[in-house]
Amino acid sequence: MLQIIAVLQSWIDELGIKLVVTDIHAYAFIGVLSILFLVSLSLIFKSTDKAELEESKEEPSKEEPKEEFELEEKAEEKAEEKEDSDQDAKISEQIKADLKQVATEATLEEDKPQGPSWTERLKKGLSRSRSEVWGKLGGIFTSGKIDDDALEEIEEILYGADIGPATASELLDALQEQVKKEGFGEDQFKAFLKEFLTQRMESVQEKVDNSLFEYEKAQPGLPKVIMIVGVNGAGKTTTIGKLATKLTNQGAKVVVGACDTFRAAAVDQLQVWCDRAGATMIRAKEGANPSGVGYDALKEAMTSNADYCILDTAGRLHTAGNLMEELAKSKNVLKKLMPDAPHHTLLVIDAITGQNAIRQAEEFNKTLDLSGLIFTKCDGSSKAGSAVAIVQKLQVPITYIGVGENVEDLNEFALNDYIDALIGN
Ligand SMILES: Nc1nc2c(ncn2[C@@H]2O[C@H](COP(=O)(O)OP(=O)(O)OP(=O)(O)O)[C@@H](O)[C@H]2O)c(=O)[nH]1
Ligand SMILES: [Mg+2]
């Protein structure tokens, strides 16, 4: 205590205060010190607690939420990934849709008849016959007066049209009656001609079997058998290629028999068409004859449940007796497999042959009992009108008409369209 009093007295003296330090001052000093000590202690504890509290507050926000934060981060990442994958899926869906659209448009484009319509092709195909014969006749009537000179000119043109002398003189006789009528001009002539030609073909054309150009599903194992015959180069193989394409395009299953075993090139030519058409082609086995190929093709068509079996044959002159007999044999061989085969025997006629085609057709008809004619290459000839004479003479209908080398250039023979294209509207 004395030491404390002495220390206090020295501090007071140093401060210049005139005070004698006693025990009371010393106790008071110790008291104040103790209080200060306690206050500072309490302050220290308080701040430590606060710090700890702060720390404890921070810790959990560092530790536990860390996990939470990671989870949140992962969730966010996943959400982002999902968003990305959703976006990717959307993009790929869009691409797929776009591709589908492009494919559909391309298919539609493919399905669209390429180039001109059939009516336009037919008109173009028959343009030579129209301008050089039938349309030219119409032109004579525009002058108004039909005198003997005009009738002579008409006669000359008609003979050049290759409709045959009998049909030509019938037409002239009927026309002479008509021209006497008042106001008989080009329009009246066209109407008269249309009626005249229609009458000569109509009843025969009605016999055509529609399943030849409109696909009819065959009974399983019972394909429709079509045999194509004709002179060399008439257009048999090309027509078969077009026909097979038309039928497969409608969904038909087609088997083609390459019965022209004489020339390897003929088989290759047919193979190209069949590949294009998606038809199965049966070719000759080593040393096989045409009848054997026909037999094999029909067998294949029957076992594979094809709808059509089309047989290509080698071209031959109607005057070549042995070759005509060979055709008859080929036809009969088919009956071993199917008694009513072939359902159609069609003769291909090149329009340029004109009137002479009647002889050809008669010979083929005698040997094979033709069920129809196919009139090809009308585009390269002015004799497309000869069809009238051929049909009238043979009483065999025309099933198809060809006006060019493309698939679209072959179509069903529709009498009205043919006459309209021939005469011109
Ligand atoms: N302009 C035109 N050419 C045709 C038509 N049909 C066929 N041809 C062409 O006529 C030629 C002969 O045709 P093919 O189909 O080989 O005749 P083919 O009757 O099979 O001949 P062979 O087997 O030798 O008797 C080919 O160049 C064909 O492209 C047609 O309607 N118009
Ligand atoms: Mg051929």
Image (tube, rainbow, N blue to C red):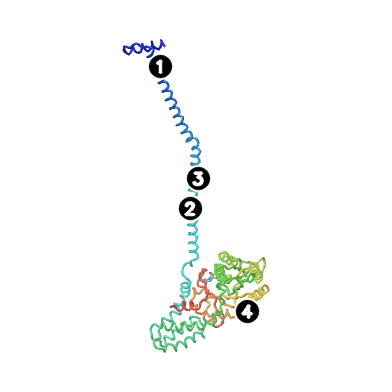
Q: Residue at x 66, y 66 (%)?
A: 285
Q: Is mark 2 within 8 Å of ligand 1?
A: no
Residue 330 at x, y percent in the picture? 65, 74
Residue 189: image quadrant is: bottom left
Q: Nearer the viewer, residue 241 or 222?
A: 222
Q: Residue type at mark 4: give it.
A: Thr
Mark 4: few/some/many CA within 10 Å (<14, 14-19, 20+): some
Query: Does residue 89 appear left or right of residue 36 in this picture?
Result: right
Quarter containing the C terminus: bottom left
Q: Real-space Cα distance between discs 1 and 3?
A: 69 Å
Closest to the camera, between mark 4 and mark 2, is: 2
Closest to the camera, between mark 4 and mark 3, is: 3
* Residue position for label 3: 78
Residue 424 at x, y percent in the picture? 44, 78
Marks 4 and 3, the one that precedes in the sequence: 3
* Residue position for label 4: 367
Dot 4 falls on a residue whose secondary structure is helix
Q: Is mark 4 within 8 Å of ligand 1?
A: no
Dot 3 falls on a residue whose secondary structure is helix
* Residue position for label 1: 30
Query: Does residue 272 appear left or right of residue 196 in this picture?
Result: right
Closest to the camera, between mark 2 and mark 3, is: 3
* Residue position for label 2: 90
Marks 2 and 3, the one that precedes in the sequence: 3
Q: Residue type at mark 2: give it.
A: Lys
Q: Real-space Cα distance between discs 2 and 3?
A: 17 Å
Marks 1 & 3, CB-CB < 8 Å contact: no
Q: Real-space Cα distance between discs 1 and 4?
A: 152 Å
Mark 2: few/some/many CA within 10 Å (<14, 14-19, 20+): few
Dot 2 falls on a residue whose secondary structure is helix
Q: Real-space Cα distance between discs 4 and 3?
A: 83 Å
Q: Real-space Cα distance between discs 4 and 2?
A: 69 Å
